[in-house]
Amino acid sequence: MSLRERALSGLLWSSIEKWGSKVFTFGVFLVLARLLEPTAFGLLAMAMVFIDLAQVFIDQGFGRALVQRAELDEEHKDTAFWTSLGISVVLTAGGALLAEPLARLFGHDELAPILRALSLTFLLGGLRTVQVAMFWRELGFKLLSIRSLISRAVAAVVGISMAFSGYGVWALVGQELTAQAVDVVILWFASSYRPRFRVTRRHFRDLFGFGVHVMGTDLLEFVNRRADDFLIGLFLGPKALGYYVIAYRVLLVLTQLLASVSANVSLSVFSQLQKEPERLWRAFRAAVRYSALVAFPAFFGVAAAAPEIVPTIFGSTWEPSIAPMRVLAPVGALHAVLYFVSTAILALGRPGLRLGLYALGAVLNIGAFFVAARHGIFYVAVAYLVSSYLLAPLQLAMLRRLLPFSWRDLGAALATPFIGSAVMSAAVAFGVHPLLLGQPDYVRLTGAILTGVLVYPAVVLTLDPSLRADLRKIARKLAPKERVAS
């Protein structure tokens, strides 16, 4: 297959993975939200702040370095594997030792055993870095999709069963450990790669020179995304954090479903076009355009219908999550675009520039969150919104230095989905809400969804009739080819 055909195939299977696993996981999350208290989600979020921080150091960016390299030796793979595994063993032991001090930091002794149990995820993470990278490099997203669906299904059975049995927060812990364990087993069964002890200093330097910038960026991205959880847990406690987690989880799931699906494929595609700037710009523009067409209405819709979404889906217990959810939704719309900016900079071999942008974002976010966290979760969400939109123009300007493009051309790619989403939101706010005032929440939510489904496509297809032809072309590319009779 050509690069375009492989990219479309990879995009299809990446979409199946993200949509299948995330939609399924989110459905399980909704069930658990009905069975567990907000404090349980807050305690898990506190623990995951430290677990996710340590996970950054396991990969060290070596996985994406394996994907990005034009020439790859077996020694590169082995060096990456043994380095990741060695670090994961150290982190597993360290997590068990530091569980008590970290629990005291938050003032919740029940956090210590949770941290010890979740430290096992470090070892599991070290066992899968190279296998995932190899499938990713070859656009082998079919296997990754199947693996993700199976592991999430098994984990769901464990999590829900434990919740029904009254295990509380341990239902969430059991779900996380099960998903990762099954994930590793499937990867090792399906992958042809088996490590040999071929670790060399030269191959380590090859990977580390690129990977250290990726790791630094991942670390700063962690700060950008998890500093709010840490500070809310520290100043406001697990219950407030539980409400914030629900609001942020909707943003995160939609971002993963609507933006990171194609971002995974785009790194492979952009990397192969790094010496052809015109083709790379066309691929970048198309990725941004189609991502925005899907993501913008979803996030605008969440902002408009949050007062109906939360009580209908999560229950009235979670109503304090409504206000931060409405504020965080526009951040997701922005991320749908910036995902590709970051990926393009990385594919062009400039991880240092990407690192610098993330460092600036981390400084901005930490300062804003530290001030806002003392006043409540709504103000933390506002701080995240303001800092994200302040940094976005600089990120685009840095990309323009590497990949010259017209601001008008980029604006044209985003204008149609933005206008369509704005009109749709106005129809919900000024049409559905007044018309169905006093009706049950589920009736109002149904009305909002139907309005969005009708209004948004009508607006975007009116503004840009060429979309019809583009969608038909994509459908033909994705459709299975008929076999020719011999």
Image (cartoon, rainbow, N blue to C red):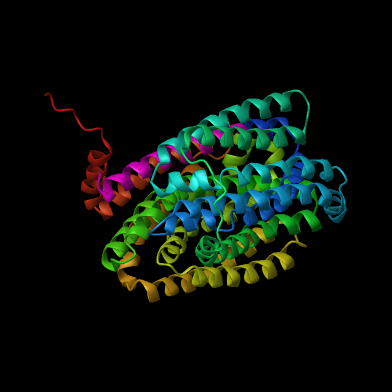
Q: How many numbered tags mark residues here? A: 0
Q: Position of residue 92 (x, y in %)?
A: 73, 47
Q: Residue furthest left?
A: 486
Query: Would residue 266 appear left or right of 118 to someone viewing this image?
Result: left
Q: Is residue 177 magenta?
A: no
The residue at the point 83 percent across, 53 percent down is 102
Q: Position of residue 464 (x, y in %)?
A: 26, 54
Name the residue at 70% across, 46% down.
243
- Considering depth in this image, is 234 or 341 the residue closer to the camera? 341
Residue most toward the bottom?
A: 401
Q: Is residue 318 above or below residue 164?
A: below
Q: Where does the image place residue 241, in percent across and percent down from the top left? A: 73, 49
Residue 230: quadrant of the picture:
bottom right
Inspect this view and state whether residue 29 appears.
no
Which residue is nearer to you in this view: 458 or 135? 135
Asked whether the viewer can see residue 472, the reply is yes
Q: Is residue 22 magenta?
A: yes
Nearest the camera: 18 or 391?
Answer: 18
Which residue appears at 71% of the width and 41% of the height?
Answer: 120
445, above or below 241, in the image: above
Which quarter of the rendering shows the C terminus? top left
Frontmost residue, 340 versus 347: 347
Quarter holding the N terminus?
top left
Location of residue 58 in the rendering, given as x and y in whole percent from the top left corner: 63, 53
Classify 282 as above or below 431: below
Majority secondary structure of magenta residues: helix
Determine whether 339 is above or below 400 in the image: above
In the shown orientation, is residue 7 left or right of residue 147? Answer: left
Segment colored magenta: 1-28
